Image (tube, rainbow, N blue to C red):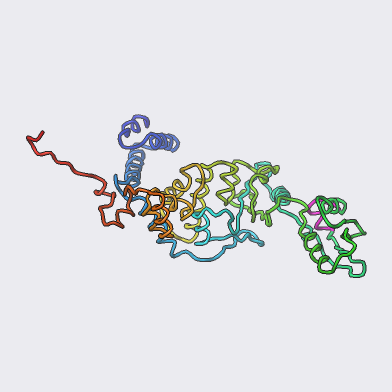
């Protein structure tokens, strides 16, 4: 059967990309003529329902379609299933607000780390997780104490814990002695002595020094507080709490083509603005779906496009898109009305009244739907 001829007849009905996909599907499934006709009709129907009329207020429709279901969202955090430990990440309305506000610091950043084919077993996945997860001295210490007689700190190291991270006592001490510090660490049997350089050390300062030493980074990637190995769809992956995408991608065994952070700003820094746009879209849509709500993905696409159209990520708020509108009245209607009007008056700004909000304020026809067009009639016989 000649599928190509059938698809070529659709030139006026469907765009090229959709036609190519149709042809590919027909050939792949080896469809009969009736099946191919049914697929074509369903595709034309779906494509027609996706289009919008000229002058339709798609911004208002998208805003309403997202914000109305968002009122049903919960204000809670959610434990990722599939592990006894579980990675607790922010979900619901707080997460959606983080995404659309383009927050510079999010509450629980996470990374989905996918592994290469050679690392698709639990043992190797755990090895990669151990390389990624940050280990501090406090994680390998079984007991700590302050020797008030000699004014030093002593910590007992758990042998199994340092074996798990592939280190020995000398390496731990070497890490503790790196950088500028007010102490000297040395091995003493199964313990480590932390000796202050200041001879006149008070107990309070000794306590502060102990807390700093316990927080000392030994191994792994800074900021990754958890790395949980899970199996999904017969594939091993790692879910982290905390993120440092640049360094994670350099770890042996990590698949850099699929590993992605939940932090749009970090994704922009590593992969660029298009990847950032995809992250906003994925995170926003996933958050809404996880709450059992149904929002057309095209509404989230419009939000993601608007936030990234200038080549950098912008929040939907007074410090982003809403605060940078060309219309004085549109800016004033959103927040801090007096400030916007005062600054515009001082600068002598002119409002061209091109958008919806400002025309509503002054009771004029809004440039939406039929309001976008002027009808001009020239009577017969007039020059």
Instruction: Based on the picture, tell me whether residue 165 belongs to the magenta stretch.
Output: yes
Observer-nearest of 349 and 213? 349
Position in image of residue 157 (x %, y %): 84, 60
Quadrant of the rendering where the N terminus is positioned: top left
Dominant secondary structure (helix, strand or loop) of the stretch shown in magenta: helix
Q: Residue furthest front?
A: 346
Query: Is 136 positioned to the left or the right of 194 in the image?
Result: left
Instruction: Based on the picture, tell me whether residue 54 belongs to the magenta stretch.
Output: no
Observer-nearest of 334 and 90? 334
> Would you say residue 135 is visible in this rendering?
yes
Q: Tell me which corner region of the image, top left, top right, bottom left or bottom right, holds residue 54.
A: top left
Query: Is 380 positioned to the left or the right of 346 in the image?
Result: left
Count of numbered circles on the image: 0
Observer-nearest of 111 and 188? 188
Rendered residue at 89%/66% (across/down):
151
> Would you say residue 1 is visible in this rendering?
no
Position in image of residue 162 (x %, y %): 81, 55
Rendered residue at 27%/49% (across/down):
369
Observer-nearest of 288 and 123? 288
**Residue 38 drawn above or below residue 139:** above
Quadrant of the rendering where the C terminus is positioned: top left
In the image, the segment drawn in magenta is 159-168
């Amino acid at each position: 059967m000649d599928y190509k001829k059938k698809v070529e007849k659709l030139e006026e009905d469907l765009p090229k990309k959709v036609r190519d996909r149709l042809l590919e599907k027909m050939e792949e499934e080896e469809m009969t003529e009736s099946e191919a006709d049914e697929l074509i009709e369903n595709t034309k129907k779906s494509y027609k329902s996706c289009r919008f009329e000229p002058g339709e207020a798609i911004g208002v429709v998208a805003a309403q379609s997202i914000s109305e279901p968002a009122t049903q969202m919960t204000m809670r955090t959610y434990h990722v299933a599939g592990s006894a430990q579980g990675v607790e990440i922010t979900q619901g309305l707080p997460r959606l607000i983080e995404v659309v506000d383009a927050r510079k610091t999010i509450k629980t950043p996470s990374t989905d780390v996918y592994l290469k084919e050679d690392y698709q077993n639990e043992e190797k996945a755990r090895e990669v997780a151990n390389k990624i997860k940050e280990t501090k001295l406090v994680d390998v210490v079984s007991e700590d104490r302050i020797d008030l007689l000699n004014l030093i700190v002593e910590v007992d190291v758990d042998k199994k814990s340092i074996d798990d991270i592939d280190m020995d006592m000398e390496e731990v001490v070497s890490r503790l002695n790196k950088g500028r510090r007010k102490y000297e660490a040395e091995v003493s049997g199964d313990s480590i002595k932390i000796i202050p350089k200041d001879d006149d050390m008070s107990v309070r300062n000794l306590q502060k020094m102990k807390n700093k030493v316990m927080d000392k980074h030994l191994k792994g990637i800074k900021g990754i507080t958890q790395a949980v190995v899970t199996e999904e769809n017969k594939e091993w992956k790692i879910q982290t709490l905390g993120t440092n995408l640049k360094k994670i991608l350099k770890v042996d065994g990590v698949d850099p083509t699929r590993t992605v952070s939940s932090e749009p700003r970090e994704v922009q820094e590593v992969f660029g603005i298009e990847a950032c746009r995809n992250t906003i879209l994925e995170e926003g849509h996933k958050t809404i779906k996880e709450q059992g709500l149904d929002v057309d993905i095209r509404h989230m696409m419009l939000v993601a496009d608007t936030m990234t159209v200038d080549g950098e990520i912008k929040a939907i708020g007074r410090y982003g898109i809403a605060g940078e509108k060309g219309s004085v009245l549109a800016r004033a209607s959103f927040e801090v009305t007096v400030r916007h009007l005062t600054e515009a008056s001082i600068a002598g700004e002119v409002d061209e009244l091109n958008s919806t909000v400002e025309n509503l304020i002054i009771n004029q026809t809004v440039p939406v739907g039929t309001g976008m067009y002027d009808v001009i009639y020239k009577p017969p016989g007039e020059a």
